[in-house]
Image: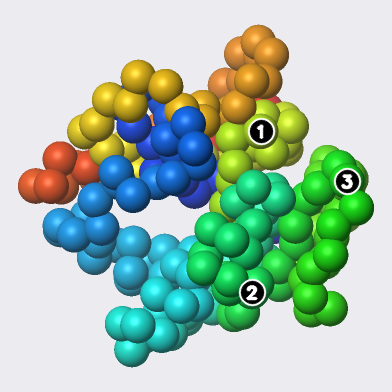
C-alpha cells in the first residue's frame, strides 16, 4: 500500500474531540504523553507551536494535512491562516471560501483523498474535524487516538454525526502514560 490516510486526534473517554464550541483547551498539553507528540508525531504539530518551542517538524511521517473548514478557520488560531506551513495544506469546504494561495481548497474530500493516495509521498494527516472524519471514514487507513482521561458529556464527536458503519480496525500499538493519556494506534482491516 502507498500513502495512508491517518486520523490522528485527541479524544475524550466518551468519544469527543472538542467541546461543543469547537474548543479543545481541556486536553492537557503537559505531561509525559507530550514526548511522543512532540517527537514521533511532530509533523502533526502546528507551525506556531514549533516556533514557540524552538523545534521544527522533521518531515518523516506526514507531508500533507487535510482539515475541515471549522478546524482550519483562521479565527481559531488568532488570525493564523497557515497553521501547518511545513505540510501541503488542504482545506475541505462545501461552500465558497477564501484561503491563501498556498492552501488548496476542495469540496470533494473523498475524491481528493483517493487522488492523494495515488501520488508518491508520506502519509496524509487527517487533522479533523469530526464531520470530515465521518465523511472520510471509509478512506481512513490508520486511526491514532490520544485518549485523555476526561469525560466531556457533549461536544464534537470523533466521527461527527456519521451514520452507522461497522468499520473494522485492529489495535497495533498502545502506550499508556503517567499523565493518564493513552496513545492507541489502529490499522484498518479490509
Q: Where is residue 177 shown, x and y percent of the image?
A: 15, 47
- Mark 1 is surrounded, within 10 Å at the Cα level, by few (under 14), some (14 to 19) or many (20 or more) other residues, namely some
Is residue 55 shown left or right of residue 63? left
Give the residue displayed 21% in from the left and 33% down from the top: 149
Residue that sits furthest to the left in the current view: 178
Between circles 1 and 3, the one closer to the viewer is 3
| 164 is higher (above) or lower (below) than 117 | above
Q: Where is residue 82 shown, x and y percent of the image?
A: 64, 74
Evaluate whether residue 144 shows in this view: no
Q: What colour scheme governs how the chains and residues are painted in the rendered image of this protein? A: rainbow
| Cα–Cα gap, marks 3 and 2 | 19 Å
Give the residue displayed 49% in from the left and 48% down from the top: 8
According to the picture, the residue beneath numbered tag 3 turns out to be: 95
Please tell me whether mark 2 sits on a helix, a strand or a loop: loop
Please tell me whether mark 1 sits on a helix, a strand or a loop: helix
| Cα–Cα gap, marks 1 and 2 | 21 Å
Is residue 109 shown left or right of residue 28? right
Q: Are marks 1 and 2 in contact (CB under 8 Å)?
A: no
- The quarter of the picture where residue 106 lies is bottom right
| 155 is higher (above) or lower (below) than 180 | above
According to the picture, the residue beneath numbered tag 2 turns out to be: 82
| Cα–Cα gap, marks 1 and 3 | 15 Å
Q: In this rendered view, identify the residue nearer to me: 64 or 127.
A: 127
Evaluate whether residue 27 shows in this view: yes
Q: Earlier in the sequence, mark 1 or mark 3?
A: 3
Tell me the quadrant of the picture where the C terminus can be found: top right
Q: Where is residue 96 shown, x and y percent of the image?
A: 90, 53
- Mark 2 is surrounded, within 10 Å at the Cα level, by few (under 14), some (14 to 19) or many (20 or more) other residues, namely many
According to the picture, the residue beneath numbered tag 1 turns out to be: 131
Q: Earlier in the sequence, mark 1 or mark 2?
A: 2
| 104 is higher (above) or lower (below) than 22 | below
Q: Where is residue 120 shown, x and y percent of the image?
A: 78, 69
Amino acid at each position: 500500500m502507498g500513502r495512508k490516510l491517518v486520523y490522528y486526534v485527541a479524544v475524550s473517554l466518551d468519544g469527543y474531540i472538542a467541546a461543543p464550541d469547537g474548543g479543545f483547551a481541556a486536553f492537557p498539553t503537559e505531561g509525559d504523553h507530550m514526548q511522543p507528540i512532540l517527537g514521533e508525531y511532530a509533523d502533526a504539530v502546528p507551525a506556531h507551536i514549533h516556533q514557540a518551542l524552538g523545534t521544527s517538524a522533521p518531515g518523516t511521517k506526514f507531508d500533507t494535512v487535510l482539515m475541515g473548514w471549522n478546524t482550519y478557520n483562521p479565527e481559531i488560531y488568532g488570525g493564523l491562516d497557515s497553521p501547518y506551513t511545513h505540510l501541503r495544506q488542504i482545506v475541505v469546504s462545501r461552500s465558497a471560501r477564501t484561503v491563501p494561495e498556498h492552501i488548496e481548497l476542495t469540496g470533494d474530500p473523498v475524491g481528493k483523498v483517493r487522488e492523494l493516495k495515488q501520488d508518491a509521498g508520506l502519509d496524509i494527516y487527517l487533522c479533523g474535524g469530526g464531520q470530515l472524519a465521518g465523511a472520510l471514514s471509509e478512506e481512513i487507513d490508520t486511526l491514532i487516538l490520544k485518549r485523555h482521561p476526561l469525560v466531556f458529556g457533549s461536544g464534537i464527536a470523533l466521527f461527527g454525526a456519521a451514520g452507522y458503519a461497522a468499520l473494522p480496525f485492529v489495535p497495533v500499538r498502545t502506550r499508556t502514560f503517567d499523565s493518564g493519556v493513552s496513545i492507541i494506534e489502529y490499522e484498518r482491516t479490509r
